[in-house]
Amino acid sequence: MKTSTKYFVVILTVSNVLYELYRKKYGTQEDLTTGDKEVLPRYKRLLKKFKESVKLRSALTAFLILISCATSYNRPRSVNFGDRQNPLSFTLPQKEVTEDEFMRFINFISSDQITKDRREIGETIPDECLKEAPTSCLGGAGGNTLPIKGGFKVSEYFVEGVLPIFDGQAMAEQLDIEFAFRSADYDSVGTNETWKFGMSWRPVEDFLIRVMKQQATRAPNVGEIASPTVTGLSNALMDPCSVANANNIDASLRQLCISTGMTDAQVGKVQDVISGQVNAFQGTNPDKLPEAEEADTFTAGFVYTNENLLDLELTVDYYDIEVDNTVGTFTAQQTLDACYTFGIASECGKIQRIGGDLTIAGSGIETYTTNLSYRTAEGIEVGINFNIGFQDWGEVSFSTNLNHYLTNERQSSNVLPIIDCLGKYGNNCSPTPETTWNQRITWSLDDFTASLLWRHSSSVDMEDVQAAGSFEAFRSIDSYDYIDLFASYNFGEHTKFTFGIDNVTDEEPPIVGGEAGATAFNSGNTFPSSYSAIGRIYRAGVRFTF
């Protein structure tokens, strides 16, 4: 669409909006320019603001939203403009437009808050001794820390709305179209755009069908583009150039090992990975900052409610989410494989050996924040809620939320294998049960409340590529069930007593050793973020309000 055409669409649409509102107020075909003297200058400012703030790429979106405003019978229930920090909302009346509402609408659209500039900056200024290479004054506590400063500036614009199509019709008690668009111009990654489009259809009062398609974009945050470079540890299974792989080193692999700083005599002789870890250079590479990641999502489901059947509410939703160009880091093992298995020279350049080794201070593998290929998740979520009343004995409510993964996989680059995390754990995947649920039963009687929570996660197995070299007892984790209890009592209007017990049955955490997963989520020989690591926990408290 040519630039002149885009501006014409926007101007014409705005004119139609104003004319329609004006006509509904005054009941005449009188031209706007000869109407209320206060309207004309606002109208001119409105057109100027739209020319300044509506991006050319979003002109079509603006057209769809504004033309829907001008439609006599299908005007949006609400339209929002602005940015995430200062959103603006305007609810269009469904019937007669008053003079105050008319003027408020013009004021709203011509507001200076339609666009917004935002800046975020991060800076690290380490003490002088922390800059000393290679391990700083802390010695074995890690590598040195160098100063860094960075951030980004962004200008944002968004518009969203809900457009009712049918209301109170046969097989269409309600049919709404939902839409949104956001344009963000970053000085770090350029312009990116986000949109969504979907519908909610209620054929009868108790049954709702909902479908939504979205494209989301996320620019790297300050921590991802301005983190100091430090030396840490990254998980690895084996160094292909070490003594552990000596019998499998052919002429081709030998040359690759030499290309990463080894002598011919060191190949196949240096020590292997120690405790499943090697040195790694982590943080931000100022010369190669990550780009924005982009997600495509699709959701579809239904909601069934029945007030006559225990206030039942049943929701079932299917979701399919794929994130491309994911912001993250390669593991050390992935870099080793990309170099020594697939012979990618750029990955070999990330391996820095000292004395042929990867565990000596100053050596390591670059694992800076970058863009990975993709990650995807697909599954079904189910929610069930209902209540049972017992007259003088209060009410018992049941609430269940279940998630079942159909797919959960990722790939770091198109030359590396796809990693299937469904029902797996390991260096690439935190424990990812195929099925999890939370079931809560709550009894309420006057000022007293008691509840029981059942948390379930299905069994998981170690990643196949890692299991072969691991202790057999560490290769799988059985399904886990936790029971939590909670009670509260309101004593008067200002005091509330609470008491709870987590993990009532004192379930022991799974023992998988210290090399079963990445250090970020595998510590203390278990996965403390996924399983209760300290057994039964008692909690008690009192809260005063004034």
Image (cartoon, rainbow, N blue to C red):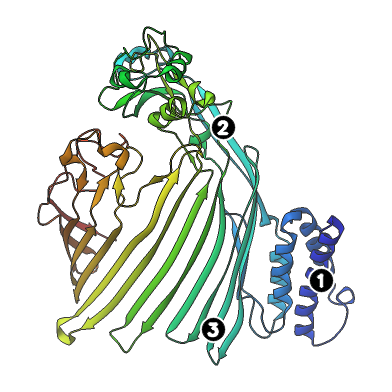
Q: Position of residue 363 (x, y in %)?
A: 39, 15
Estimate how packed mark 3 is, as few (under 14), some (14 to 19) or many (20 or more) residues with alpha carbons within 10 Å: some
Quarter of image, res 289: top right
Estimate how packed mark 2 is, as few (under 14), some (14 to 19) or many (20 or more) residues with alpha carbons within 10 Å: some
Q: Is residue 431 visible?
A: no
Q: Nearer the viewer, residue 438 or 418?
A: 418
Are the two marked residues, 1 and 2, in contact with CB atoms closer than 8 angstroms?
no
In the image, what residue occupies the spot 70% across and 74% down?
A: 68
Q: Position of residue 405 (x, y in %)?
A: 36, 59
Q: Quadrant of the C terminus?
A: bottom left
Could you tell me how far apart the alpha carbons at marks 3 and 1 are, in whole angstroms?
A: 29 Å
Q: Nearer the viewer, residue 322 or 473?
A: 473
Disc 2 is placed on an element classified as loop
Residue lying at the far left of the rendered structure: 505
The amino acid at mark 1 is Ser
Are the two marked residues, 2 and 3, in contact with CB atoms closer than 8 angstroms?
no
> Is 100 drawn above or below residue 151 in the view shown?
below
Q: Position of residue 334 (x, y in %)?
A: 41, 32
Q: Is residue 173 visible?
A: yes
Circle nearer the N terminus (1, 2): 1
Estimate how packed mark 1 is, as few (under 14), some (14 to 19) or many (20 or more) residues with alpha carbons within 10 Å: some
- Residue indicated by mark 1: 15
Q: Which label belongs to residue 289?
A: 2
In the image, what residue occupies the spot 70% across and 70% down?
A: 105
- Residue indicated by mark 3: 174
The amino acid at mark 2 is Leu
Quarter of image, res 51: bottom right
